[in-house]
Image (cartoon, rainbow, N blue to C red):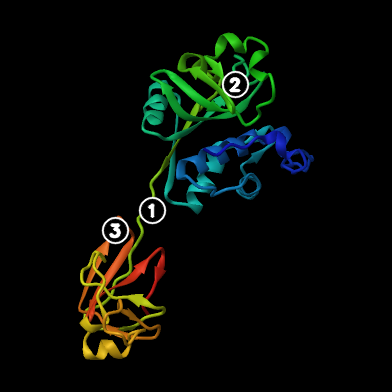
Amino acid sequence: MFYYNQNDYDNEQYNKPDGTKTTIAIGGCGVVAACIAINNACGKELYSVKKMRDLSQSSGARISDGTDIDKLLKAVCKAHPEFSFKATQLNDELLSHLKKGNMAIINQGDAYNVFSTSGHFVTAVALFDKDVVDVYDPQLYSGKYEQYSRPQRIEMATKYGARVKIDEISKASKDRNPCYWLINYDKPKENLPDYKIDKAYTITDVRGVYADKNAKTRKKVKELTADGKKHATSKKSANNAYFKKGTKVTVLEAFKDAKKKKVMVRCPSGWITAYNNNTNWMR
C-alpha cells in the first residue's frame, strides 16, 4: 500500500491563489489524500505528491483554504480516463464501495473531531469490518490519536492512521458536502498487436521455434523447413531451434493469449513468440 505524509513536505510550496506562500505540509492534505487514493487504486505510483501538487495548481484545484477535491479528481480523470469518481453523502454507498476493494476520500469537517480539529481530508483504503473503515491520515504525527476525544471515537490507531466506525466518520463529515468521493479504477485492457496472415515480418531479435502455440515443446533444427534451417543460429540438427535476428518469416496463423499478454505466430517452420513483455519482436 502507498502512504504519504504531508509533514514530510514542509519545504515544498503549495501557494494560495492570491500568492500567499505556504507549503504542502500546511495546506496540502487534499493533495496527499488524493495521491494515496489514486496510487492505491491502480496499484502503482502514478502520481508523486509533487506531481499531484502541480496538477492541483494547474487545474485550479488549489483554493484559499486548501484543495477543491472535485476539481482535482476531474483533472486526474481527464489525464487518465481509466479513473472515475462519484461524490456522495451516503454512508451505505461508501461502505459498499470499500467492500469492493475501492478507495475513497473522506471530507472531515469542523464540528466533530475525529481526524482533525478543523477541516481535513483523509483516505479510506479498506473496509476492515462491516462498519469499520481503515483510514490513512495524510497528516499523521506521533500521539495524534491519543489526543482530545479521539481515543473514544476510533476503534484503534494504526501505523498510517486509524480504524474508525462509519457512525463516527459520518459525525466527522456531517457538516461537509460532499462527505465522500468514491474513486473507481478500470484497468485498461492491453491491446495486443495484430499480425496479418500471409504477410512477411522481420524478427528483431533471436527467437525460439516451438511445435505448439503454447510454447511448451521447442523444435530441433532438424525439424525446420529447408529455408528455416538456413536462418537457424545453429547448424547442428539436434540443437534447439532459434531463428537469427533479421530473419524474415511469413505468418500463417496467429494466437493471442490476453491473460499472458502474449502473441504467438506460426510460420512454415513452427511457432514463434511475436509479442510479450510489452515488446513487439516482429516488424
The residue labelled by disc 3 is 258
Q: CA separation, marks 3 and 1? A: 12 Å
Query: Residue at (20%, 79%) from the top-left corner?
Result: 252
Q: Nearer the viewer, residue 79 or 270?
A: 270
Q: Point out residue 84 in the picture as x, y percentages from the top left corner.
A: 43, 43
Q: Amino acid at mark 3?
A: Ala
Query: Residue at (57%, 48%) from the top-left corner?
Result: 47
Q: Amino acid at mark 2?
A: Gly
Along the polypeptide, which appears first: circle 3 or circle 2?
2
Q: CA separation, marks 3 and 2? A: 46 Å
164 horizontally vs 52: left or right: left
User: Residue 4, can we see it?
Assistant: yes
97 horizontally vs 73: left or right: left
The residue labelled by disc 1 is 188
Q: Nearer the viewer, residue 191 or 76?
A: 191
82 horizontally vs 266: left or right: right
Along the polypeptide, which appears first: circle 3 or circle 1?
1
